[in-house]
Amino acid sequence: MSGDNNSFVRKEMISERIPPTTERGLVKWVRENLFSSAFNAIMTFVSLWFIYSLVVAAAPWFLNGIWDAETVRECYDLLDGKSGACFAVLNERFPQLIYGFKYPSSEYWRPNLASVLLLVALAPILFRKLPRRLLAFSAVYPFLAFWLIWGGSILTSVSAFLGCVIAIVCYSRFSSRSFAIAVLISLIAANVWWIIGGYIVDLNDSILALKDVPSRDLGGFMLNLLLGTIAVCLSIPLGIALALGRQSDMPIIKWICVFFIEFIRGVPLITLLFVANVILAFFFPPGTSLDLILRVLIMMTFFNAAYIAEVVRGGLAALSKGQYEAADSIGLDYTQSMRFIILPQALKISIPGIVNVSVGMLKDTTLVSIISMFDLVGMIRGPILSSTDWNGVYWELFGAAAAIFFVICFSVSKYSQWLERQLETDRR
Amino acid sequence: MAEKLKLEVSDEIAIKVESMNKWFGSFHVLRDIDLTVNRGERIVVCGPSGSGKSTLIRCINALEEHQTGQIIVDGTELTSDIKNIDRIRSEVGMVFQHFNLFPHLSILENCTLAPIWVRKIPKKEAEETAMHFLEKVKIPEQADKYPGQLSGGQQQRVAIARSLCMRPRIMLFDEPTSALDPEMIKEVLDTMIELAEDGMTMICVTHEMGFARQVANRVIFMDDGQIVEQNEPEQFFRNPQSDRTKLFLSQILGH
């Protein structure tokens, strides 16, 4: 069809114009998100009213809060009948909340230093862009932190560290022959060194010695952080190993892993902690006693590892069979194909799950208060609330505990979201 | 139709398969396979789907395990010995229908990984080799991208380059063009033709009959897990002997 009415030639091109005021910026956002329909508008007003009344109700409690008082009675006197919080307890019991009530106050600098160094040690692990040489410090850090927190001669830590170095050197010397032999030799070498090292440490235990702090004197949030960090760090490699073991072609390894995972997952953590507290002692020869913190750590690591193993198994299952075949077909052996091809992809898929489980673990460290360890919650429930000075200030104390955990867990989850975006290379 | 490729085939045996059988559970997927491939041969395997042709070439680099019979690749017999399997796999390149590039590694890293860790070649040298083969498949400019950013045809050419970086003596192709859009099939086939011109020993499972005519020196037709007919391409297409072959050819050449 062609006629005068249908033919058209543009003489002048239309230049770009800005959208009308109702279609840009804040106006557009408000209209689309808050008042897109009558129902939506009503809900907006109801929500605004709800937030307003919440703030109005809670504000005086925060604003009238007393930060400086010796006891809860002094607090009430100062408040003089008004509603208000008694934050003074946080002030007065701050060291107890953070370090527990037995850690010698002259030594507070040691856990402080250890936690600052923890950030330094974690940085190169969490951020790939930082210089790789910093990882050397991360490797030394666990031993350094042990010395700082528990005290004693630095030789203990040095000896433990050298044992690990010896194990790694032995492993890399023999790994070309056979994986099993290499593991066996490195274990034997390390243990031989540790026995020798033990005698050397006993001979002169005063070199760079810090004041000894026994495990039962650790407490407060420091204990939560310690348990959480160690359990999470150890359970990730263990969980990966369990997940790979569960996929193994070797039936015995597979059954052991399946049994371990299913057993641990079928039992509540609190039960495992009771086992760690009382029953585990029966399994050791009489006269030997394993440190309570160590026992609790073993249980928490096992518990978290079982969950991580299942998350990682999901990641492994999500990879196409083609990835395994391609890795095989270019001649990579099992270790290489896992290390370079399968695990990097499977772990990337598993990040949200691993973080989910691990954040849960971090919070579950407060369960140790039930087996009478004085972590943050244990301190609040025990020494602080039962003291006559601070009887009944539940909201302030538990609110503060919640706030501390929230800040840490929220940061961890933000980090994991950032990491996921960083690793997004297979966008289509 | 391009001109027929004329290439010398040596007497040296590259692959020898002798009365090989394989079952998936109770399903007898490969039955009494006998096949000898000389160095420099270009063999095209065709047949209806489910006839066992992919399984056959996957047995040659032990992605599938055979149950009875013998497979000897490059003088090494395929047994369950993992050392033998790894050695054979590093001598035999494989190209898959769905490319199977590693999505978390750049194109260059895809190509250098195995040379560095299996062949223990220094990183720099491995990268030079990789660039050489990426130029050969005509995509050196994509070296720093990730597989997800490439088209299907480009990905398949990278997959070919990745195999070549191991300097294999034999290349296996498992329906390399079946997952590609029509306009990308040619670029992959051209790469494969070039490879054949260089004298590579190739076994190729494909339905590209033009490619078979031009490149292959032998066409094998499989059905029901057995080799039904094999012949030179001219004879095979012009004068098929078995009824099954005739039926198959009439179906795929009919339209």
Image (tube, rainbow, N blue to C red):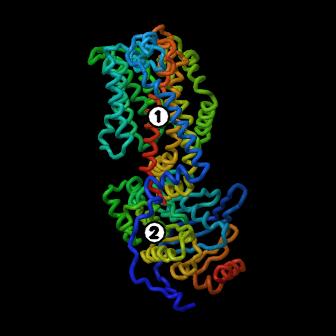
Residue at the image position 53 percent from the left and 41 percent from the top: A353
Give the secondary structure at mark 1.
helix
Amino acid identity at mark 1? Cys
Image position of A160 with respect to B204: above or below: above
Q: Is residue B253 visible?
A: yes
Q: Position of residue B112 (x, y in %)?
A: 39, 58
Residue type, mark 2 in image = Gln
Question: Marks 2 and 1: which is nearer the front?
Answer: 1
State whether residue A333 appears in this view.
no
Question: Residue most toward the top?
Answer: A388
Q: Nearer the viewer, residue B59 or A111?
A: A111
- Give the camera-side residue of A64 and B253: A64
Q: Label 1 neighbourhood size at 10 Å, few (<14), some (14-19), many (20+)? A: some
Q: Is residue A360 left or right of residue B128?
A: right
Where residue A281 appears, x then y in whole percent? 55, 16
Which residue is found at the position 46% from the left and 64% from the top?
Answer: B159
Does residue B134 appear left or right of residue B219 in this picture?
Answer: left
How many neighbours does mark 2 have within 10 angstroms: few (below 14), some (14-19), or many (20 or more)?
many
> What is the spatial separation of the Cα atoms under label 2 and label 1, in whole angstroms?
43 Å
Label 1 marks a residue whose chain is: A
Q: In this rendering, is residue A344 above or below B220?
A: above
Taking the image as shown, residue A231 lies to the left or right of residue B49, namely: left
The mark found on residue A409 in the picture is 1
State which chain disc 2 sits on: B
Mark 2 lies on a secondary structure that is helix
Q: Which residue is mark 2?
A: B154
User: Is residue A148 depicted above or below A233 in this figure?
Assistant: above
